[in-house]
Amino acid sequence: MAGDLPWSDLVVAACLLAGGFFLFVAGLGILRLPDVLIRMHASTKAGTLGVGLVFAAAALYFRDTAEIAIAALTVIFLLVTAPVAAHAIARAAYRTNVPLSDRTHIDEWKGKYGRDGEGPTDGAGTP
């Protein structure tokens, strides 16, 4: 049966399955992980990889210059904006005292970003 399919269809199917798996893992991470920082990490990393694989599958399937360009630009946009958005969400969550997980033993931002009224409040090192 697999011998009847062209190799490109097998690659498209593999990309879709892998992308769907990573998107599932991202969704599961959002539901199951204990705090906002860890949830954000799961959704950013796995979600970006999953969407990238799905768009790669679409580009391989359609094989049109316009479709490939749209897929490539979308993946590039996601790769550029996802880390910036994740950083902004993490910083806002930390500054608004969203509780960390009980399993968080090291707080590297303590005293740097004004959590619980300590340290600088503007992030630039000035009180």
Image (cartoon, rainbow, N blue to C red):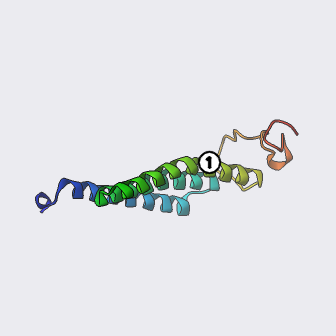
Residue projecting furthest to the front: 66
Quadrant in the rendering for residue 57: bottom left
Q: Residue at x 38, y 61 (%)?
A: 20
Most foreground residue, 30 or 76: 76
Most foreground residue, 7 or 107: 7
Circle 1 — which element?
helix
58 horizontally vs 80: left or right: left
Residue holding disc 1:
84
Number of numbered discs overlaid on the protein picture: 1
Where is residue 2? Give x, y as percent.
14, 59
Residue type indicated by callout 1: Val
Residue 73 visible here: yes
Where is residue 112? Give x, y as percent.
77, 39
10 horizontally vs 82: left or right: left
Where is residue 92? Give x, y as percent.
72, 53
Label 1 neighbourhood size at 10 Å, few (<14), some (14-19), many (20+)? few
Where is residue 108? Give x, y as percent.
69, 38
The quarter of the rendered structure image containing the C terminus is top right
95 horizontally vs 84: left or right: right
Residue 50 visible here: no
Most foreground residue, 84 or 21: 84
97 horizontally vs 118: left or right: left
